[in-house]
Amino acid sequence: MARGGPHISARVYLALIGVFLTTLVVAGVRAWVAVRTVEVGGPLYAKIIADKDLVADILPPPAYVVEAYATVLELATDIGQVPVERVSHLRLLEEQYHKSLARWKRELPAGDKREYLVGDSAEHAKEFFREVNERFIPAVEGEDAGLALELARGALGECYRRHREAIDRVVNLARRDGAETEAIAARVRADSRASFVTLAVLLCATLFVVAFMCVAQLREARRANAATRAKSDFLANMSHEIRTPMTAILGYADLLLDSGADADVCRAHIGTIRRNGEHLLAVINDILDLSKIEAGRMEIESIPTRLARLLAEVDALMQVPAAHKSIALRCELASEFPETVITDPLRLRQILVNLVGNAVKFTDAGEVRVSAAMDGEMLRVSVRDTGVGMTPEQIGRLFAAFTQADTSMTRRFGGTGLGLTISKNLAQQLGGDIKVTSEPGRGSEFVLTVRVLPVAGSATVGAGPVVAAGGALDAAPAVARNDSRPLDGVRVFVAEDGPDNQRLIAFHLGKAGAQVRLFENGRRALEALTTDGTADGPLQSPRPCDVMLTDMQMPEMDGYTLARTLRERGWELPIIALTAHAMSDDARKCLDAGCDRYATKPINREQLIDCVRPARAAA
């Protein structure tokens, strides 16, 4: 089953929002701290902070004192020649000074620095104007030039100088605080810009990530919907694939119950039941194989395999459906082959049967040509047909689970839609792949590649028709098949809880010459092997049977417990597991419990006899 990208959970969204809000709060706190630093740690002159010309901004009150002293000097040096209005101007300057000083005090924040700066200069200015009013102006009005000049150069001059020192301190402090303020303000502006740039970048990044995740979620949702639709179609198709043969099986079983049917008709009915049963088994095997692939539990074996014989078996198997459709099936070896290679023959055969079977299924006229060649350690098998062909869009969906190239093909040709998915995965696990080229109405070519390792010292099979290469290799098993009683004299204990399976197993083994004794569970079988007839008693010697055939899932005592118990008590004869489970882990579990061999249901006569046959030599 195709899987989409990773699911984005709500926690990711919450984490991103949390990071964004945290950064926002941190930036806001930094800006607030910077502003407070300017307000508290900078100069106390709000007006000075705001204006550019710091000196001019702090001078208005002292400037009136400076102008007043200039007027004092003018009056002292030119008594009698200066208009009387200059005396009135001197009083006006004092009035303007006090008004400006009052306004200045209102504009400056309260604090020690304000009292120091304003208070110091104000005291000197106050003393200056007191001298002017009390002594200097009377001297000027009395035209006492000597006293006026003495006052201008003496007490008034000293007051003015002290006032100027206070002014200089104010100016210098203002300049220094102004520089500090500008530096702090610059930092604030830089911090603010950095904070807002950070916020903007983070916001953009967050929006991008969220948008990306939304797109990913949308794509994932679309893939999930497509997968859901595919699975729904698959389940509907599976229902059809299972119900159709089941209908035939049940229907023809009812016909067999008709006592009026003659032998030929009964044989035809039995053939129909068997054919549909084999189809059901193929459907179940496809589903099991896909489950193994999905779970990552598909295991590949590496055993010596006779390639030419395997290809000949596939050819012989596929000739029957090809002949039924009047299609020519030609299989050939396009190059020399090592007779024996290391690969997994079961899975390689499964892939070839699927590819050739599909070619025959989708071809109504013409031929199917199979060509095999060796390229170093790579086996390359080309399966070319003259069938319906496919479009590029259909090829793109071809290897997806639960699909065929077109749903109409499922209705027309049948099938589970799993075969190519399984085959491609198996080919990749065998070190190769499956590639396809096709043209609608002209046919398709599937090319299978798998890695095989030639066995050292193996003979070489020449190029030519595959039937000729594999025919001689198929002759050996005929001897065994001609033995009508291959189990003659073998004593078999069978632990099986299903009555129908009991009768079937007993029939096959009995017909092969075996002496069969049936038990409905493992406990009954164990009791039959002990001297006192109990499950806890010692085992009989000599043994009452030559082989134990046990189902693995039974009530009271299952096959696993029976096998372990027998091995723990010294049982040395064969134990054969018989179960409906078909996964590789199930086989390992049976062997770990103490079984020697493993056979799966449904029961195959030849497989069952082959499992029991080794016991004949020991009997």
Image (tube, rainbow, N blue to C red):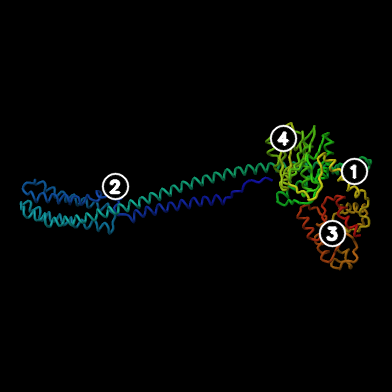
Mark 2: few/some/many CA within 10 Å (<14, 14-19, 20+): few
Helix, strand or loop for disc 3: strand
Q: Residue at x 50, y 52 (%)?
A: 19
Q: Amino acid at mark 1?
A: Leu
Mark 1 lies on residue: 256
Determine which of the numbered discs, if any, sits on residue 401 in the image: none
Identify which residue, 406 or 477, lies in the foreground: 477
Q: Mark 3 against mark 1, which lies toward the viewer?
A: 3
Labels 3 and 4 touching (C-beta < 8 A): no
Q: Which residue is mark 2?
A: 52
For mark 1, does the 10 Å Cα neighbourhood hold few (<14), some (14 to 19), or many (20 or more) residues? some
Marks 3 and 4, how far apart in space?
Answer: 51 Å
Question: Pointer 3: what residue?
Answer: 575
> Mark 2 and mark 3: span between their CA atoms?
105 Å
Choose between 490 and 31: the one closer to the eye. Answer: 490
Q: Position of residue 268 (x, y in %)?
A: 89, 40
